[in-house]
Image (cartoon, rainbow, N blue to C red):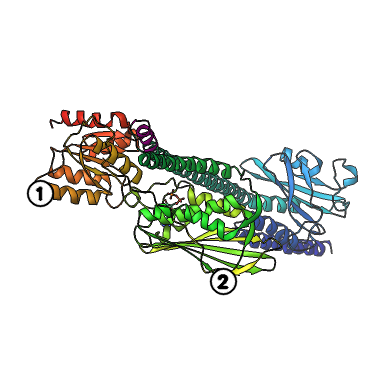
Amino acid sequence: MSDGLESNNTASDEIVRNRYLDILHQFTLRQSSLIKLEDIVWNIAKTAIAELGFEDCVVYLLEDDGITLRQAAAHGPKNPVDREIYNQITIPVGKGIVGHVARTGEMQRIDDARLDPRYIEDDDFRLSELAVPISHQGRIIGVLDSEHHAANFFSSEDVRLFTTIASLASTRIETALAMERLEKTIHHLEQARSDLECQAEELREARQAAEAASVAKTHFLANMSHEIRTPMTAIVGFADLLSREDLDRQHQAQWRNQLNQNARYLQDLIGNVLDMSAVEVGEVSLNFEPVSLLETVAEAVDTLRARADTKKLRLETAAEGLLPDAIITDRVRFKEIIVNLVSNAVKYTEQGGVTVTLSTERRGTDVLLSLVVSDTGIGIDPVQLNNLFKPFNRVHDTHQMAGIEGTGLGLALSREIAKALNGDITVSSLRGTGSSFTLMLPAEVPPDTVWEAQPAVNPFLVRSPPIQSDVIVDRAQDLCDLRLLVCEDSVSITSLLEVVLEAAGAQVTFCANGSAGVRCFDEQVEEGRPPDLILMDMQMPIMDGYEATRYVKRLRQDIPVVALTAFALADDIDRCLAAGCDYYLTKPLQIHTFTQELRSILERFGA
Ligand code: ADP
């Protein structure tokens, strides 16, 4: 009987052992294909432990801090669904039975938890507990823990089984942990690299912006130098002429007019620069009032009539449809925008003309005003259209810009003002054909406004009389009978030089650009009466002074070329000399010593 019983027990032990071995075998096989930590620990809990038939199991892993154990996977009541852990807790190393195993590395089998004060009740109170360490190369990395309601539940066989599972899984867990740490490190490194790239990009952008600002500032300073020195030459020169005795009334009036015009130009320029800085810090003060529409537009356009006239350009104004006699806006600012747009149209047009067309769209008690300034000028490259409104930006190359004065502020300022008046400026242009700038301005109209059809805004004409060259002001005759060729595009400076040089006895031929200058030079050389000296403005349209000087010097080294430059920076002077100029005089010219200076240059040159 007992034999039969024993052999029965042995047989059933054998079955259990075989089942355990089979489960361990399956477990080892499945584990070998798992890589991710999560898959590995859940495989321990859900497959191995669950299939062994234990009612509860938790896999604890040691956190990176080395002092906390977290519940990483579970089987039984702690795992109601999927891979979720119910009421997930952490246990400090050293606390409770699990904490004890983690600290000592010793397996713990508790047969009656009521007798063990270390027992921590988690989801339920159970009498038996088995906790084995998961260690790798002598270092504890986690604890495999199982509990059972019955006392004395876990057998020596179970201990061996748990220990085997823990030891089989430990290398895989450690590898997965190392992989996770590596991935985290890679992620941090990638994050750091992308942060560094962002910072590098920001630095690049900041450097580009700083470089662009520096280039814009240098351009601005060079332009301002030119812009200020050119009218200053005229102001100082005409003031000088006016201080002389024996002047007749006609010349007094003409020169005073020239002086006033240049002084006003300077005043406008300085006003523009100050306005721009006010706009940039958001300090444009506006004064909204009823403004007579046609009158204001006519006034603005007429300030440019003299300039258009000098360039033999048409300057036409037209009105379309019904227009209100007044709108509510800031009169000064409104006029300033129109002056800037028309001034540009005249500046950047050599042939044809400029048309200013006014039309409005009635919107209840308000009006949307549209003022289009179109010209037949040099036009603008489409890729540059976006840059037009950036401060200090002159979008044409220096060759096209030669002789065209400007600071690159007008459009930026105009658009800012238009926006402050709730409007905007848009542009369309065709290179070589012309440009069209449109000011769109919404405005209220005063209550008693009269709407009328207007065929055109009446222009009025201002023409300054030409200065006669037969007036002798300077009787020193420093340049008696010398032939001078003067290439200069500024009308004011030409007038001034004409008076001064001819008064000094010179025979002067004036050319308004380098191309006309070299043509004239060729003719004079061919006719056997080459100039004794050439005065060369460096910034001129069509062909600048540098190119014209190079041309002259290729043919005749013996004729002195004196640069007249309004750019007084060291680089500009070097450029003049490199082009072949023999001397340079910077504007404003000292009119009272000017002819003597030319005389001494000629003497030094051996003339
Ligand atoms: P600037 O003082 O140089 O005239 P603006 O701000 O008024 O400065 O204009 C910026 C640039 O836009 C000019 O330098 C010029 O290149 C271009 N531009 C402005 N108006 C015109 C126009 N009507 N035709 C062609 N180019 C123009």
Frontmost residue, 17 versus 235:
235
Q: Secondary structure at mark 1?
A: loop
The region drawn magenta spans 234-245
**Which disc, if any, is residue 527?**
1
Q: Residue furthest right?
A: 114
Q: Is residue 240 in the magenta section?
A: yes
Q: Residues within 10 Å of mark 1 (few under 14, many from 20)?
A: few
| In the image, residue 536 above or below residue 367 | above
Between disc 2 and disc 1, whose residue precedes?
A: 2
Badge 2 vs badge 1, beta-carbon distance below 8 Å: no
Please give left or right for residue 567 compared with residue 279 in the image.
Answer: left
**Which disc, if any, is residue 321?**
2
Q: Residues within 10 Å of mark 2 (few under 14, many from 20)?
A: few
Frontmost residue, 555 versus 88:
555
Q: Is residue 326 in the magenta section?
A: no
Q: Residue furthest left?
A: 528
Name the residue type under label 1: Glu
Q: Secondary structure at mark 2?
A: loop
Can the viewer see residue 515 in this picture? yes
- Residue 241: image quadrant is top left
Please give left or right for residue 337 compared with residue 545 in the image.
Answer: right
Name the residue type under label 2: Gly
